[in-house]
Image (cartoon, rainbow, N blue to C red):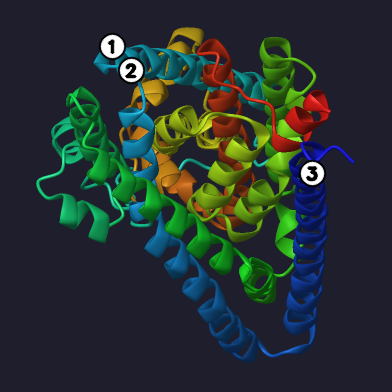
Amino acid sequence: MDEASLPSDKGARFSLVGTDMNRLFTIIIVLAMVLGVAVGWAVHQYALPDQAKAIATNLSIITDVFLRLIKMIIAPLVFTTLVAGIAHMEDAATVGRVGAKTLGWFISASLVSLTIGLIMVHVLKPGASMHLAIPDAGKIVSAVDMTKFNLKDFVSHIFPKSIVEAMANNEILQIVIFSVFFGTAVSAMEDRAPAVLALVEQVSKIMLKVTSYVMKTAPLAIFAALAATVATQGVGVLATYAKFVGGFYLSLALLWALLIAVVVIFVGPRALKLMMAVRSPALLAFSTASSEAAYPGTLQALEQWGVSKRVASFVLPLGYSFNLDGTMMYCTFATLFVAQAYGIELSISQQITMLLLLMITSKGVAGVPRASLVVISATLIYFHLPEAGLLLILAVDNLLDMGRSATNVVGNSVAAAIVAKWENQITAPASESQTAVA
């Protein structure tokens, strides 16, 4: 037997085992989702409202613990992976080039997402049949905090006054800014500070191992999240808003199809395997209604598929602040849904202005709680639409947030793959490279 073939066979076997484990984990997640909905329905159907609320509160403890564990991982993982990725780039010019390509893609994807939402809400007209009376002027909606929604606070908030504070509060954008400065400085040093770089890379590996431990609890968190939601709201909420919810998910499906088509055009048929690779993170984001929960898994999936670590660790954190495709589509869809519900017509010029406004404001609320509602509320005020219309979508906002979160994961995965292709930073996964050697 040729001894040189042993590592190849071992690598191939390891890759196959990893693929089987991913499939099994995806099946477990789906089963957890189904079981969560079933248990939530049973509680909503047979328990008293106060009992159902108490059960949902207790179930939400599991979800809260899981999301806290995820937040525990995010800051060190973003910092170490981003610093390591930038430090391995040739120079500051490379960082600037990759950054320009990344932001260029983000802007293009944002415009497409907003436009699809605009077109689909006109085609489907989900709010046209509601015929609501315009409420009294000055009615206040206090569901969202608008105090942070201004240009001065946003711009100043981007730059951290303390990296310790930024990490403590999980301010991803601030962590990205500090990491870019830190990684660029390491890259600019003549010897690239080998001790520091080695430490950062080791911490990154340790955090990925911690991530694998945390992710083993994901199915339990998914079950608890869905059971708690359905127990309090019931599945009947879907019937009330069927046209709105169904239309939005149809729009998301079209966006997914377009994103997949584009990445196949740029990267080739192998991009379809990327969609399979990120299915578990996307399901996790969908079930927990949290893109943040899927960050570690998405980063691992991108690297396992073949996106280089330097590109994945650079593009993904930026995407979580500037490339929220699902959220942006929701903003146009929901805003015009409110206008239709009250029978208010907006001119073409107003709608174009809305697109441009949302293009900017959707980038300015990274880290703000219930960011999409903040953006929608500001847009309603700007176009003199009934602010009380925000109450129409609050009942199903969590359900819609599930689709938005999963779409954000897919959109950022596509962005990372395309930027990696432009930079020639896509490598063959272990199984393919070993097969080629054999």
Q: Is residue 436 left or right of residue 256?
A: right
Foreground pick, 187 / 121: 187
In three-dimensional space, the C-alpha distance between marks 2 and 1, rounded to whole angstroms, equals 8 Å
Q: Which amino acid does label 3 sit on?
A: Leu
In three-dimensional space, the C-alpha distance between marks 3 and 2, rounded to whole angstroms, equals 34 Å
Q: Residue at x 48, y 44 (%)?
A: 389
The residue labelled by disc 3 is 6
Label 3 SS = helix
**Mark 3 surroundings: few (<14), some (14-19) or many (≥20) residues within 10 A:** few
Q: What residue type is labelled 2?
A: Glu
Residue 245: x %, y % from top left: 70, 45
The residue labelled by disc 2 is 90
Q: Establish if 85 lies above or below 163.
A: above
Residue 287: x %, y % from top left: 65, 58
The residue labelled by disc 1 is 93
| Residue 250 in sight | no
Label 1 SS = helix
Foreground pick, 315 / 400: 315
Counting residues from the N terminus, which is met first, the one under dot 3 or under dot 2? 3
Verify CB contact (< 8 Å) between mark 2 and mark 1: yes
Quarter occupied by residue 73: bottom left
